[in-house]
Image: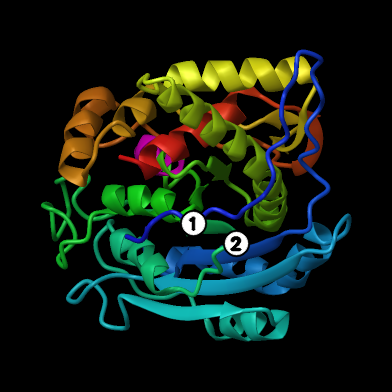
């Protein structure tokens, strides 16, 4: 295959839902967006890096079409630890508002190297802690990968007990949720398919989505659509937080499923709409049953046990043929149950 801080929340007024439902406008907001690319730069990833390099300007152009968005980019490149790779474990480029600077980083990025199947995914995710995220920005980390972290499966892993520096990718997902970072896992298929459930779980913990890709050309459209959806998701998150606070104020114990259902019913009844990322004109498939169980774990060792039990063969689902076409778009649709569920998952992970 080769070749945490407290969660920060802006002081934005909440739209009250009265007996006569009033639609909540999730689109017309002046927003700041911090978008961090976390890219596997081992040899098999050259086509994805090239796609990002050629199209990074389009991310700004299309996200800013309908409103004045203030966008910053960061880039984290990662490979593996010695002796598996002797170049670097990861390289970090902190946030910049300059598209030309981001492009220069991508121009200098080369896909090369690699040793065992596993890569330094945990170390790459850990870099969020040292990036200059703005407190009031919508924060998105896009992990682009075709290989699992160390410690998920034992076979063929130089470090079967986990990252040699002791960094836990599951704990990193929870810490992302606490600071308000949404994680999108872009899975480069078919290579990632045996580990898809795990990457779905990481994204679900941090309130994001797993985005399947078998054609590198679809990468930028997927990122643009995901970013547009996350800009709209902030209001849904506020509604979830408001519901949690209301339950606590009455002396109750908030339950994720009950909160999700209550907020969804209220927003659905009010006719609230939100931007939604579509693949081939359909919403992305939600997390699998195995991914939802993995997302309940609090550490990689716990996740590994669930993964081994629930995923066929204990080392990943057998690869299947990727779809013939992949067209990603973002459209305004009624708020979905999945969107509210993701917001609730992130809120509960943030307090875990």
Q: Nearer the viewer, residue 216 or 219?
A: 219
Query: Pointer 1: what residue?
Result: 8
Instruction: Name the residue rendered at 64%, 72% in the picture.
Output: 72
Query: Pointer 2: what residue?
Result: 136
Q: Quadrant of residue 33?
A: bottom right
Q: In the rendered view, tell whether residue 55 sits above or below residue 223.
A: below
Are the residues at dot 1 and dot 2 in contact (C-beta closer than 8 Å)?
yes
**Residue 157, x across and y down, in percent:** 17, 55
Q: Nearer the viewer, residue 218 or 132?
A: 132
Q: Is residue 40 found inside the magenta-colored segment of the image?
A: no
**Residue 80, x across and y down, in percent:** 28, 70
- Mark 2 element type: loop
Residue segment shown in magenta: 194-203
User: Dividing the image into 4 quarters, which one contains the C terminus?
Assistant: top left
User: Dividing the image into 4 quarters, which one contains the N terminus?
Assistant: bottom left
Q: Quadrant of residue 152?
A: top left
**Residue 85, x across and y down, in percent:** 26, 76
């Amino acid at each position: 295959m080769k070749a945490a801080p407290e969660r920060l929340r802006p002081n934005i007024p909440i739209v009250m839902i009265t007996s006569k439902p009033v639609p909540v406008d999730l689109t017309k907001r002046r927003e700041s967006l911090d978008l961090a690319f976390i890219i596997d730069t081992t040899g098999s990833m050259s086509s994805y890096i090239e796609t990002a390099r050629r199209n990074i300007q389009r991310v700004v152009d299309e996200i800013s079409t309908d409103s004045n968005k203030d966008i910053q980019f960061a880039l984290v490149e990662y490979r593996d630890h010695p002796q598996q790779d002797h170049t670097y474990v990861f390289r970090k480029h902190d946030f910049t508002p300059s598209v030309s600077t981001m492009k220069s980083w991508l121009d200098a990025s080369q896909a090369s190297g690699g040793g065992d199947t596993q890569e330094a995914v945990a170390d790459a995710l850990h870099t969020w802690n040292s990036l200059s995220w703005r407190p009031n920005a919508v924060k998105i980390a896009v992990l682009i990968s075709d290989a699992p972290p160390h410690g998920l499966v034992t076979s063929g892993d130089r470090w079967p007990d986990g990252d040699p520096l002791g960094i836990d990718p599951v704990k990193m997902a929870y810490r992302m949720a606490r600071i308000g970072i949404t994680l999108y896992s872009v899975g480069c298929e078919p290579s990632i398919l045996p580990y898809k459930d795990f990457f779905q779980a990481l994204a679900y913990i941090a309130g994001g989505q797993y985005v399947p890709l078998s054609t590198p050309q679809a990468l930028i459209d997927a990122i643009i659509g995901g970013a547009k959806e996350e800009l709209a998701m902030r209001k849904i998150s506020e509604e979830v937080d408001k519901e949690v606070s209301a339950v606590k104020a009455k002396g109750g114990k908030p339950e994720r499923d009950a909160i999700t259902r209550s907020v969804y019913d209220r927003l659905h009844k009010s006719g609230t709409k939100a931007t939604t990322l579509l693949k081939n004109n359909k919403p992305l498939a939600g997390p699998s049953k195995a991914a939802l169980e993995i997302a309940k774990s609090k550490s990689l060792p716990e996740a590994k046990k669930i993964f081994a039990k629930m995923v066929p063969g204990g080392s990943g689902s057998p690869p299947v043929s990727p779809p013939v076409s992949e067209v990603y778009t973002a459209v305004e649709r009624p708020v979905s149950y999945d969107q509210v569920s993701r917001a609730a998952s992130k809120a509960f992970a943030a307090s875990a």
